[in-house]
Image (tube, coloured by chain):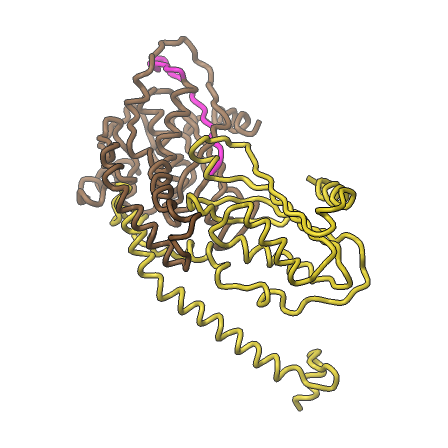
Chain colours: A brown, B yellow
Amino acid sequence: MERFKQKQMNQNENEADSAINGHFDGRVKIPGWSAGGAAGTPSTAPSSSVMESWREERTRSLEDNEMSLPSIAAAYTTILRGLGEDPQRQGLLKTPWRAATAMQFFTKGYQEKIIDVLNDAIFDEDHDEMVIVKDIDMFSMCEHHLVPIFGRVRIIVLPSLSTTFTSCFLFCTRIVEIYSRRLQVQERLTKQIAVAITEALQPAGVGVVIEATHMCMVMRGVQKMNSKTVTSTMLGVFREDPKTRDEFLTLIRS
Amino acid sequence: MEYQKAAELNGLCNGKILTVDSKKVAVQHKNEISRKEAEDESRLPALEAAYTTILRGLGENTDRQGLLKTPLRAAKAMQFLAKGYHETIYDVLNDAIFDEDHEDLVIVKDIDMFSLCEHYLVPFFGKVHIGYLPSKKVVGLSKLARIVEIYSRRLQVQERLTKQIAMAISEALQPVGVAVVIEAAHMCMVMRGVQKINSRTVTSAMLGVFREDPKAREEFLALTKGAQ
């Protein structure tokens, strides 16, 4: 099984290798699942395990931000000079600081953990139909080119008997914020969101679809204006039961 | 032999063979490009080092697989996004200015534009609509889009970008009037700060008759609103 193989590889890994998105792998047991991995996206490198523990430590704090700001600003000044611009002209005087703060904002997901989000009230709702949260605006940073990615996320959750429901909408949007405000690859982002919702809510099934525009493709490189990338992850019943998956896809398209 | 080949290849003009000259121009152009490329290459290591510092400052692990070559890619991407500094309009206009007896409005609209905000180093993008009233000289239509490219591939402020495009066309063609309208979304407002997703900034630059005559301006604005 794919998950078993991943676990084996995880055990052989170096500590340094297991840092993904700045976080360390947790070894998480997800009970009752027969298959892991993303739907449709082949796993690439062996070290890209996405089973993150929701009890992870934050890798960054506000103090860290303040301390690293001068060095990031200095780096931006070098970049401005390297592009042939004059960092002393009026429009660019404070740009290194603004750009550094902006970049820290775009990666603020590293400062947050899922457990913070779950501190909101938890309700035990008696609801066993699908819950869909559509059109969550998502802004992320491409980890390969450091250029923005933006798009929309759709999440479907099918609760199980043991699901404790927070305000699903609030939880889902905040999860999207935490994971998208990082240096990301769209496939990994989709998977991380699905896994986080699964760990927190223990539902019968979760489906996440992201449709996004990548500035690295639009502004440079191939320069295809209208292209969009769609990735999806289905876990639980959505993966196993074809009827549920059909319902999911119909609702996603609407 | 060369004469005949030139004749086939549309290389004859006034009995003179163009191929020799165009070869010289091509070589000169290639030299210029290589010089710019060499300049870019020489600056790359500094940019790479800067990006590595930034990644580390953000708390990322620069040795993980996804980030190994990111400083290089990001540096090259940034150089591409700032390539307008290397170009002048005279390179690009390529003598594509023609004498035509046309005195009515010429509009090229919905030109996609991508630029970098000079305050936050974050993209802003949108559409440019250009109109001009020629005075005996018209320009090749794609050259208008190329002028947009030159000025937008820089660290810009939308107001300045609009004005630069208008002034460039004005200088090159001496038309009766030039109008440029840019409508753009600024990622610095959408992704951070106020985070207003649907807001758009519209700026315009009107020179010549478009500034003085409200009817001309109206006609331009009506025609550019057409297919939006």
Residue A70 in the image: above or below residue B3: above
Residue A144 in the image: above or below residue A179: below
Residue plotted at (62% across, 47% down): B128
* Quadrant of the drawing holding the N terminus of chain A: top left
Majority secondary structure in the magenta region: strand
Magenta span: A150-167
Residue plotted at (25% across, 35% down): A60
Choose between A8 and B154: the one closer to the eye. Answer: B154
* Quadrant of the drawing holding the C terminus of chain A: top right
User: Of all residues shown, which one is farthest toward the front?
Assistant: B212
Give yes or no for residue B11 being in the magenta stretch. Answer: no
Q: Position of residue B8 (x, y in %)?
A: 71, 81
Residue plotted at (51% across, 74% down): B30
Choose between B107 and A218: the one closer to the eye. Answer: B107
From where the camera sits, is residue A156 visible? yes
Residue plotted at (32% across, 56% down): B48
Q: Position of residue A158 (x, y in %)?
A: 42, 20
Choose between B214 and A180: the one closer to the eye. Answer: B214
Residue A140 in which image quadrant: top left
Residue A45 in the image: above or below residue A135: below
From where the camera sits, is residue A1 visible? no
Q: Is residue A75 left or right of residue A209?
A: left
User: Of all residues shown, which one is farthest toward the bottom?
Assistant: B1
Q: Position of residue A143 (x, y in %)?
A: 36, 45
Count the labels in the image: 0
Residue A174 in the image: above or below residue B156: above
Q: Is residue A172 left or right of residue B221?
A: left
Q: Position of residue B77 (x, y in %)?
A: 42, 54
